Image (spheres, coloured by chain):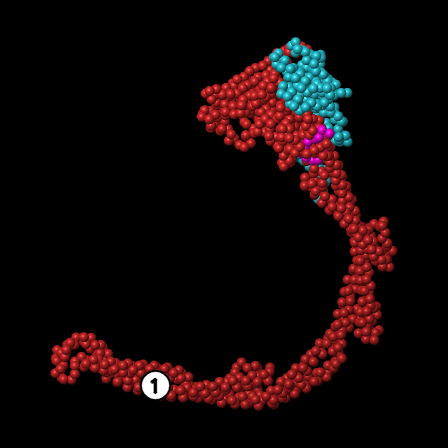
Chain colours: A cyan, B red
Amino acid sequence: MRTTDHVLEILVKEGGYRKLPTPFKVGSLPFEFTHALVAGERANDLVVVIEVSGDTIDDGVTRKILALTRALDVMGSKRPVTAVLTSGQPRTETIHSISRVCRVLPIGAPIGPNAAEAVRDWLSVLLPLIQQPPIETMLNWTVDLSASLPTLTGNEFAKSVIDAAPRGKTAVEEVLADAITRSVDAATADEGDEE
Amino acid sequence: MNGVRLKNLTIKNFRSIRGQVDIPLDAQVVLIHGTNGMGKTSVLSAIELGLTGRIAHLATNGPRYQSYLTTLDSGGGSIELSTTAPLAGGGGVSGALSFSDNTFIPTPVLDASNARFFSERCYLPQATLGRLLEVYDDKKTGANSPLTLFVKELLGLDPLDALVDGLDYAFNVTRVRKLVPDFVHLEKTKLSLEEERRRLELSINDATRVANERLVQLNETLKLLAQQNEALLVTGETDLNQLKVKLDSARDTDQRITDLSRVRSELRGLQERWKSISSIELSHDQAGKEKADQLATDALNSWWSSQANVLEEAVKSARIHFSDLPSFEDAPEQSRSEGERRARAEADRCERLIAAHSAASNRVTSLNAIVQQASTRISEINANLSSAVKDAKSLASALAGIGPHIADETCPVCSRNYAELDSGSLSAHVAAKIASLSNEAGRLQTLATSRAEETSRLADAQRALLSAASEQLSVEDLAKITERRLQMTNLVQTLVDLKETAAETTRLLAMAAIARQSVVTGRRQDEQSALVLPEIEAMMQKVLQVSYSGFESIEVALAEANRVIDERVTEVERIAANRIRASSDLDMRIRDLSHIATLHVERSETLARLQTLDSAFREVEITRAHAKKISEAATKVRSDIVTKVFNTSLNKVWRDLFVRLAPSEQFVPAFRLPVGSSVKVEAVLETLHRSGKASGSPGAMLSQGNLNTAALTLFLALHLSVPVRMPWLLLDDPVQSMDDVHIAQFAALLRSVSKGLNRQVVIAVHERALFDYLSLELSPAFAGDSLITVEIGRNFGGEAVAKSRTFTFEDDHAIAA
């Protein structure tokens, strides 16, 4: 799969982007990029994907982007533009000049085992934040603890220790001390009678 | 909850904001712009003050900042802040603060806990951003580092910590002892009980051994007894008490011993008496004694009438002088010698008196001579003194008093001219007269001294004379004493001559007395032996059942009787001794058995107690084992939770955020987790290479810009990791050292946070271009979305001006989609 396709897939599937026809029109002007997408419901980003190939002329890319943003300005649009450059790497000056008018993601063509991840990392800024489940819901230490102590289920001592835990270290110590003291006292009580 | 927004802010004379500004905040995003020094930060600080009543990052250095809040020379100011609704936990919708140089009266919107949450998790002041990584990388404070505290608070690990720490005691007996002091007592008791058990077992063995030895001895003793009685043998089944009663009841031997002893002592008495009689009897010749007595008496009488007469006379004459002399009849020699001694003493006394008399007479004579001489001399001196009629000395001093009055040759006394006499000058004459008178006075002095000496000598002589005279005897006394001396001397001579006679008399007297005594004794013995013989006969009959006449002599008979009695006594005593021994052995046996029984009881009691203790120890061990298990489980659960939270939540969020801002950075910051189930939760910061390999700390691996990004995303990650208490995020110029690329990413991130996660974002920037860019990027993208931009500036009067614009969603038709 080419990086361009990969980008397209991530944006559409994970970002909820909608692909624009090629060429698409701003006002009455048609613009042609490798791909063009707009964000879904809660954003109004416009993403253009430019596959940089051997025959791509850097100045041409620059011109096209400038023309696009200019057209959007003229139309009074507030859509933020992001240019995703895939496959080849354009010259630094090109990136520099494009980035004056839009967000540039020079992904290139990552290779190696982490290639997919690298692509996603580049694009993540365009993707919605995935809210992690609140930590509270991940935590239920009493259940975890009980689960890891199957042999002590129903054990009176274990129960009182775990009950005491939220009251702090001293409370736990007291429960332990009480348990030991009970055993000790049971033995030494007889002693006291006899002595 | 998510609907609550900050609504409106009114600031008056606060720091760099002079005058009053109203800032509407009721929008999803509030973008504040102002060039440096215009008061952007003041606006955000004002929001913090309205919400919390303090400026957290300044308050760490004390409350001094409170007095610098007022704009110079404005006298005082105020902040009012309102929210659209109360927070989920309740509380107000408006907060205020009024302040001046001296006053600071906050009435914040949030309570203390929420205020802290806001300051730590919702508001990132510029000052904090730079230090954020340091704060969270501070390992020095160990278990109480901000990160650890955050993690603990976030995860609610306190109960697990409490379990791990509290059950720590169970892992070591020493700690158990410390926790439960009674446990030490229990251990000691066990030791002592075991000791007791060992001791009891030893005692039982010893006692059994001793008892068996005694049993052998007892049976031997009983065997001896059996010679007189039926055979007895003690075995395990013997009723010892019955046997003892039997032994004790056979008491006839005692009576026999008493009887035999009495008979024996009577026999001994007889023997003694017989011996005393028979020893004298050897020289028994009563008639001879009578005769000797007669002879001695005759000899004495004849001596008495012839020789002793002279002696008696002499003693009698001595008794005239010395009436207390011993009587002559009783002790002639003593009377004589005593008379002689006394007579000698009297003669000596008389001699001494006479000698003293003569010495005194001689002394009287010489003393009389001295008295006579001294009297004569005193008369002479008296005559000399009377010749000096005038008191020479007083006249001389009178004349000396006249001396000064003699001016010329005219006498001051008689006024005659001394020159007429033609014998020198008057003053010379007077001086010569005084001198002569002084000499005369010296002579008179000497005379007076002599007289005193002489008088004293006279007095001494007279005193001596008196004493000497008293020692002299009168003429009659002298004659009497002289005569007495003569008598005594004669008496002494007489008595000395009679010494032989006296001795003989004494001897004869003694012989007569001895003879007389011998006669008397013999008579008494005759009487006694007549009494003893029948008694001896009775005793012989009693003991031997034969008469003493059958024996060679009475002594032999008595000895035989004695021997027989002794044998009998010995025999009976032997039996009695055996019986007593058997009885006492039996007692010992009974005691031994009861002692052994007691020991057995004690041992079984000890064993029971030991069992109780052992079960207590087992219970404690079980409790400890449980405690250990729980502690270990708690450690593991805690470690699992920490790992889970860090890996699945915190690190993931942080990475996500960081990658959004710096997609090309090869090193991603992360928390490194404690390896294994270490006791303490301590995370440190590190970076991970994209390949997943751990690398150095962020400070070492990241550029300054990305370090800033790391800090900013750390803040956001922490903000997103905790449950949302209030959906606000305030950022004060967080992009100062970011490059353009990052700013574009940052804008997208802000948008995601605000629109995707429903946070109300308030952000202040100083750069105009960025402000414009963010206005564009954050502009409303859907219905209900909103943006307020505020530009802080100053009018010509120097008062702050806030120009705000509100943007709402407008459908974007630029792209024909």
Question: Which amino acid does the dot numbered 1 rest on?
Answer: Val
Count of marks placed on residues: 1
Expressed as whole percent of the image width and height from the top left, the position of residue B787 reads: 59, 16
Magenta extent? B677-691
Name the image quarter holding residue B114: top right
User: In this rendering, is residue B88 above or below B495?
Assistant: above
Q: Secondary structure at mark 1?
A: helix
Category of crowding for the residue at label 1, using alpha-carbon neighbours closer than 10 angstroms: few (below 14), some (14–19), many (at least 20): some
* Left or right placement of residue B90 versus residue B232 in this view: left
* Left or right placement of residue B99 versus residue A75 in this view: left
Q: Is residue B755 visible?
A: no
Q: Nearer the viewer, residue B707 or B95?
A: B707
Q: What residue appears at the point 33 percent right and 87 percent down from the top-left corner?
A: B373
Q: Is residue B790 visible?
A: yes
The quarter in which the N terminus of chain B is drawn is: top right
Q: Nearer the viewer, residue B6 or B388?
A: B6
Q: What residue appears at the point 69 percent right and 79 percent down from the top-left corner?
A: B520
Q: Nearer the viewer, residue B568 or B131?
A: B131
Expressed as whole percent of the image width and height from the top left, the position of residue A193 reads: 71, 41
**For residue A67: magenta?**
no
Expressed as whole percent of the image width and height from the top left, the position of residue A4 reads: 73, 19
The quarter in which the C terminus of chain B is drawn is: top right
Query: Which secondary structure class fits the magenta region best?
Result: loop
User: In this rendering, is residue B484 above or below B163?
Assistant: below
Residue highlighted by disc 1:
B371
User: In this rendering, is residue B666 above or below B490?
Assistant: above
Q: What residue appears at the point 69 percent right and 38 percent down from the top-left corner?
A: B169
* Left or right placement of residue B532 versus residue B782 in this view: right
User: What is the chain letter for disc 1?
Assistant: B
